[in-house]
Image: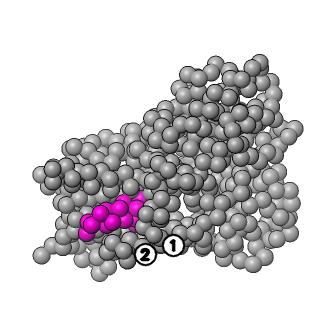
Amino acid sequence: MSERFDCIVVGAGLSGITCAGYLGKAGKKVLVVDRLAEVGGSTVPAKVMGCTVSMIYPLVAKSKYGDANGWAKAAQDFGADVRMLSSSAPRIYLKGAERPFMTIPRCLSPEGAANWMVELLRAARPDLLGEDIERDMVPIMREIYEAPLQTLTVDWGEMSVKDWIIRRTDHKGIHFVFNMMMTGCIFTCDADYTWNHGSVGKGLVLLRMWLAGDGLMSVPLPDPQRGICMPLAEAIQKKYGCEFRLGQEVKKVIIEGGKAKGVAIIGKSGEVHEVIADDVVVSTRWGSYSSLFDPMPTFLADIVKQAAAPAHHLGSAFVIYVLDDSIKLDGAYFMAFDKQSGSHILGGTAQSTEQPWNAPDGRQFIWTFRIHTAEDFEKIGMDRLGTEMKTDMEALFPGFSNALVWESPVQTRLAPSHYFYNSQPKVRHSYPAVKHLYFAGDCTHPMHSMLTDGAASTGAITADEILGACQTHRD
C-alpha cells in the first residue's frame, strides 16, 4: 500500500524547507525528500585545503521584516534558532581611476544616496557629470527608497535596466553609474548585457539594502547550512511534524489525468516506491526538471527550451585563494569595476575575516568570481581569465601574491542565465495544465528579494498558494 501525505516537497534547500514549514504550521502532513544526505541544498559546503567553502552570502530583504517573507521571516515564524551578524559594508574598486577605492556608505536619505552616486560617477567617469545631475538623481533615489518590496521584485522584476532608467531621465551620466551598480548587484557583470537584459528590480533590492540599510547582507553563525537551513529544518520537524527523507532521490513526479499524484522515490537500497500526496512542490533548480518528469509537461518543456537558448548563456569563472596572515584582508564583499565601460570585472569576499570557520588558524580564505557573456567567456579563455583575476586581486589587496599559499584551478561554468535576467522565461508557481503541481526555488517567479532570501520567499509564496487553493476547495 502506498504511503500518503498532504504534500510532498522535492528539495531540502531554503525554498523547500520554508515551504514545508508554512504548510506544516497550517496543519498539513508534509514530506521533504532530497537526494543529498543533509539539508541545505546550495548552502551545503565543500572542504578545500582545510577551508569550509560555502559560496553563499545570505541576504535579508527587510531588516524589520515588514512585507518580506524570506528565510529570516520564516525563522521568526517557526521559532528557529537562527543567529547572524551584519556583514561589513561592501568595498568598491575602480580599476584605472585616480580614486580607486570606495566603500558603499549607509545613506539615511535619498538626497544622501543621490550625492554618493554622483561621487561614484565623478571617480569613474567625470566626463559624464554634465549639468543638474544631482537634481535629476534625487527623485530617482527617492523612488527607490520608498517603493514597496513587492514593487521592486514583482512589478519591476522583469523590467530591464534600460527600460526602467530611461523612463526617468535622459542624463547619460545617470545611465552610466546606475547601470554600473546594476552589473554588480544583479551579477550580470557585462555592462551592455546588463543594460539590455538585467532585471532592474532584483538589482535594486541589493542596492537599497546597501545604501538605505533596508535589509542586510548577513553572516550566519556558524555558517549558512548549519546556521540557517539546519535550525529551520529542526524547528519544523519538532513543532509541525514535517518529515525529511535525505539521501533518497525522486525518480519522477507522478502525473495522471492532468493532476500531480505524488512521486516515485529511489530508496537507499535502490528500490523504487511511490508516495502519494494531494500536492507536489518541486523546489529544485530548473535544470533538474528534465530528470523529474517523464514525459515533461509541454509548458515546462517550452520554458526549459527557451531558457537554454545560447543568446543568454553566461560564463562564470571561480577561483579560491588561501593566504597566510602576513597581510590584513578587508572582510567585506568586494566589487571591482572597469571605470571606462562600467562592467563588473571581479567580485568575491575575504570570508575568513568575518566568517572564521572558513579557514584554519594562520590562514585566510578568499573566493572570487568573474562573469562574462558566453561569447566573451570563450574568447578570453581560462588561462587569461585566471591571470587577470589574480592581477586584480593584487590591486585590491597589496601584498596578496607574497601571502598566497594556495590557489584553486580556475573553476568554470557556462550555462544559460535564468531567474535574474528579464529576457528569460520564468517558471511560475503553478499552471492550470497540471493541477496540484507547484514550483518553488531560485528559478521561480515571483520571488521577494533575491538570492537566498528570494529563494526562501518562493517557498512561502507557494505555501500560501496551496493553502489558498485548499480553502477555495473547502468553500
Tell me where residue 50 appears, x and y as whole percent: 66, 76
Q: Give SS at disc 2.
A: helix
Q: Residue at label 2?
A: 234
Q: In the rendered image of this protein, does residue 145 appear above or below residue 275?
A: above
Residue located 25% across and 69% down the image: 29
Q: How is the image coloured?
A: one colour
Precedes in sequence: disc 2 or disc 1: 1
Residue 269 image label: none
Q: In the rendered image of this protein, does residue 97 appear above or below residue 474?
A: above
Q: Which residues are magenta?
A: 9-29
Q: Quadrant of the N terminus?
A: bottom left
Is 444 left or right of 301, judged from the image as shown?
right
Q: As shown in the figure, which amino acid type bears the numbered disc 2?
A: Glu
Q: Which of these two is toward me, 326 or 13?
A: 13
Residue located 82% across and 51% down the image: 395
Is 42 left or right of 303, judged from the image as shown?
right
Neighbor class of circle 2 (other Cα within 10 Å; few <14, some 14-19, many 20+) is some
Neighbor class of circle 1 (other Cα within 10 Å; few <14, some 14-19, many 20+) is some
Tell me where residue 108 appears, x and y as whole percent: 70, 43
Q: Give SS at disc 1.
A: loop
Q: Residue at label 1?
A: 81
Residue located 38% across and 71% down the image: 236
